[in-house]
Amino acid sequence: MLFKKIIGHELQKSSLKRAFDENRVAHSYIFSGPDGVGKKLVALEFAKLLNCLKYQSNRNLNHEFDSCSCASCRKIANGIHPDVFVVEYRGVKDIKIEQVREEIEERLYLKAYEGRFKVAIVDEAERLNLNAQNASLKTLEEPPPDSVIILITSNPQSLIPTILSRCQNIQFRGLPEGILTDEISKFGNFSREEAVIISRLSNGSIGKARSVDKVLISDRKKFITKLSRTNTNFATSIYDLLSELPLGSSPEDSERLKFYFEVILQWLRDLVLIKIGFGDESVLHRDLIPLSREYAGQRTLDKLLEKMRVLEDIMVAIFRGNANKELALENLIFKIAD
């Protein structure tokens, strides 16, 4: 059946498939869960199922084909189907009313050209500002016939309660470590140990895992080694390490910085596990065990836990607040290296 080539999310896929088979397709959905776990891929595959010519002509094919090359499915895969559209707002802090009306509502109310369903997929729906969310309520409550709206978000709490109550929520989780590790081993030239490290750093997100390469894994080791040996008495040592972090405002720099935060956070967790007596098999950065044991041996458990709290506070300040990135990271390096 369609969906089969998407890794994991079996419960979510079967739920959507069953709703279609039983003519219980909701008018509006929220696909919620961590970034990069496949929510948009499932949404696009669902749009294919709703409009698939092959499937509609023969329901006996239920479980007999993994993908489809009918005209409708090909157009959706290539992003050119007139009745299926993905609305993305990369780099935009707030989605405004005018954008919702022009890019979503007006297109939904147009007559379908060739599909059975008109499908609007709104990525990063948490960017909808309050006015835009309120303006969307009527469309979510009384959508045009044979239309489906899918709001994709990693932060459903940012959506107002009235939107949450009008949509069927399909929750996604990160992929299990074993499955993700196997996939990483397939698409990357990584050792099993490297694949496990990438899997854990990616928190179940295959999208994040695919963004990691050999260079980044090598840089991870060099960065942690340098961080653990930084002398806080010398400002040049801190600035030297700071220069290795991506400080730009581009989406690529933001994702790379998040990766470094996750690297440091997992390393601090390793230190805590070592400090309380766990064995090497519990440690993520196994290629750094000697260095980690040396570092943990020179700090108290309370000190290590304090460093984790500082890291988490600075992450929130940078990615959810308006903190000066360079000053916040300078403070982080000082606190961790101390």
Image (cartoon, rainbow, N blue to C red):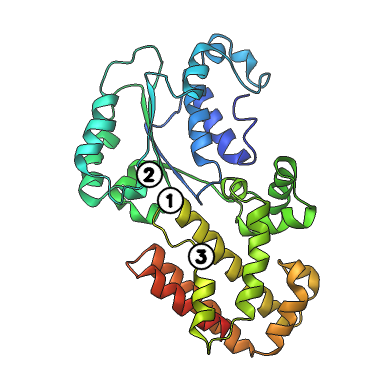
Q: What's the mark number on residue 260?
A: none
Q: Position of residue 201 (x, y in %)?
A: 62, 59
Mark 2 or mark 3: which comes first in sequence? 2
Residue at the image point whose x is 22% and y is 34% from the top: 101
Counting other residues with Cα less than 10 Å from the Cα at mark 2, is it few (<14), some (14-19), or many (20 or more)? few
Q: Are marks 2 and 3 in contact (CB under 8 Å)?
A: no
Q: Using the image, tell me which numbered label, if any, was put on residue 251.
A: 1
Q: Which of the image's four quarters has the N terminus?
A: top right
Horizontal relation, residue 61 to residue 336: left or right: right
| Element class at badge 2 | loop
Q: Nearer the viewer, residue 147 or 335?
A: 335
Q: Identify which residue, 158 or 301, lies in the foreground.
A: 301
Task: Give the residue number, with chain letter if any, for mark 3.
Answer: 245
Q: Which is in the foreground here, disc 1 or disc 3? A: 3
Name the amino acid type tagged 2. Arg
Q: Is residue 116 visible?
A: yes
Name above or below for residue 11 compared with residue 254: above
Seen at 60% across and 55% down, the residue is 202
Regarding residue 142, the answer to whether it shows in the image is no
Label 1: few (<14), some (14–19) or many (≥20) C-alpha neighbours in 10 Å: few
Single out the mark in the foreground, 1 or 2. Answer: 1
Q: Secondary structure at mark 1?
A: helix
Q: CA distance from mark 1 to mark 3?
A: 14 Å
- The residue that mark 2 highlights is 90
Residue 226, image quadrant: bottom right
Q: Quadrant of the C terminus?
A: bottom right
Looking at the rendered structure, the kind of residue marked 1 is Pro
Q: Which sits in the foreground, 319 or 125?
A: 319
Residue 52 x %, y % = 51, 17
